[in-house]
Image (cartoon, rainbow, N blue to C red):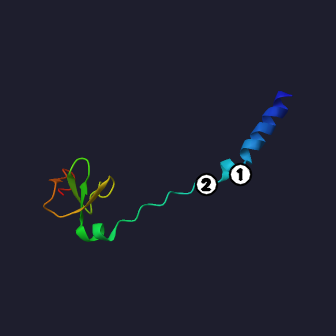
Amino acid sequence: MKKLLLTALVAALTFSPVLAAEPTPAPSPSPTPAAQEAGFWLTEKGGKRHNSKCRYYQKTKGKPCEATEGIACKVCGG
């Protein structure tokens, strides 16, 4: 009896459409045209400036800025 229940459970989990479906990736936010032109991103909370090649560029809340605004990032030099 236990073997029959175990077999049924494995079959149900293996063929379940919920588990078999691949998760859809979340759409990535597209940068604003102003941010693309500026080339620098100023974080809202810390006031750090990142250039467009930095791994932190547009990863936090912030706004496009000029090269003279805020504090330069220690990773990219802002």
Mark 1 Cα-neighbour bin, 10 Å: few <14, some 14–19, many ≥20: few
Location of residue 46 in the rendering, given as x and y in whole percent from the top left corner: 23, 47
Location of residue 71 in the rendering, given as x and y in whole percent from the top left corner: 15, 52
Q: In which quarter of the image is the N terminus?
A: top right
Q: Residue at x 33, y 54 (%)?
A: 59
Residue at mark 2: 22
Q: How far apart are marks 2 and 1 (CA)?
A: 10 Å
> Sequence order check: which comes first, mark 2 or mark 1?
1
Q: In which quarter of the image is residue 57?
A: bottom left
Residue at mark 1: 17
Task: Count the marks.
Answer: 2
Mark 2 residue element: loop
Please say whether residue 50 is visible from this viewpoint. Answer: yes
Q: Does residue 51 sit above or below 20 in this rendering?
A: below
Q: Residue at x 29, y 66 (%)?
A: 35
Q: In which quarter of the image is the C terminus?
A: bottom left
Location of residue 61 in the rendering, given as x and y in whole percent from the top left corner: 32, 53
Q: Quadrant of residue 55?
A: bottom left
Name the side, left or right, on which 61 lies relative to 40.
right
Location of residue 54 in the rendering, given as x and y in whole percent from the top left corner: 27, 58
Q: Does residue 73 sit above or below 66 in this rendering?
A: above
Between 10 and 70, the one lying in front of the other is 70
Residue projecting furthest to the top:
2
Q: Does residue 31 sit above or below 12 in this rendering?
A: below
Please say whether residue 55 is visible from this viewpoint. Answer: no
Name the amino acid type tagged 1. Pro
Between 76 and 70, the one lying in front of the other is 70
Mark 1 residue element: helix
Name the amino acid type tagged 2. Glu
Residue projecting furthest to the left:
68
Q: Residue 1 carries which label?
A: none
Q: Which residue is drawn at 56% across and 57% down?
A: 24
